[in-house]
Image (spheres, rainbow, N blue to C red):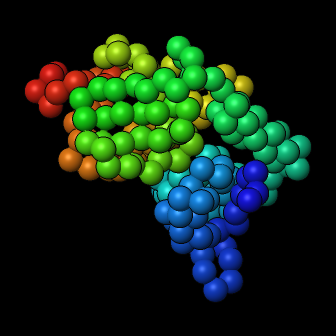
Amino acid sequence: MPDLILLDLMLPGMNGTEVARRLKADSRTAMIPIIMLTAKSEETDVVVGLTLGADDYVTKPFSMKILLARLNTVLRRSEAASNATPVGGEGVTLKTGPLAIDSSKHEVTVDGEPVKLTLTEFKLLSALVSARGRVLTRHQLMDKAMGTDIFVTDRAIDVHVTAIRKKLGSANWLVRTVRGVGYSVQETPEEGE
């Protein structure tokens, strides 16, 4: 299996967004980081790419030095996530309401049913649950999920949170928006509403 996928969106036969969707839907490849490479630089194109699970998005024309720096950053994040010992030791399971996150297995379940998340989504949700109800700003979430050495817009965090809520299905109420500040996780649907 590859360590990272550099995916052009303009492919013959099948476009890159469909390739990304299929990769993220397959449990064997879902955790492989994807960097999308494309001439499409409109905000909506970037949002679609991130929504599909891309870990980064590079637009053409690009500098080879910048591309290599982004490749190295995503690989470092991916390697750190796979080698990291969960806070509190090996085998820590974070729980809130119907949600359980098993850090050692890199698995998320809602009411015992598995939820497939990208690496970035997993890190964001883990950071929110670890905060135990405290509100995390978008900047704090960026640092926890993507590292302090990468620039990501506030909108990118919002897109990832929207994707997480969608994947949580009927338990989407777990992730609460605190307008003008950031996000938190709540134990019950009634809290904060």
Q: Which quadrant is home to the C terminus?
A: top left
Residue 175: image location, x then y, percent: 30, 32
In this rendering, position of residue 56 left or right of residue 114: right
Q: Which quadrant is home to the N terminus?
A: bottom right
Taking the image as drawn, is residue 49 in sight? no
Residue positioned 58% across, 64% down in the render: 23
Taking the image as drawn, is residue 74 in sight? yes
Is 179 or 50 nearer to us in this picture? 50
Is 190 or 37 nearer to us in this picture? 190
Residue positioned 46% across, 33% down in the render: 102
Residue 96: image location, x then y, percent: 29, 26
Residue positioned 57% across, 23% down in the render: 90
The part of the image, by quadrant, that contains residue 94 is: top left
Residue most toward the front?
A: 91
Residue 117: image location, x then y, percent: 47, 47
Is 158 or 39 nearer to us in this picture? 158
Residue 125: image location, x then y, percent: 43, 32
Residue positioned 36% across, 33% down in the render: 100
In this rendering, position of residue 180 left or right of residue 40: left
Residue most toward the bottom?
A: 13
In this rendering, position of residue 181 left or right of residue 34: left
- Whether 26 is drawn above or below 129: the answer is below
The part of the image, by quadrant, that contains residue 184 is: top left
Tell me how many marks there are.
0
The part of the image, by quadrant, that contains residue 148 is: top right
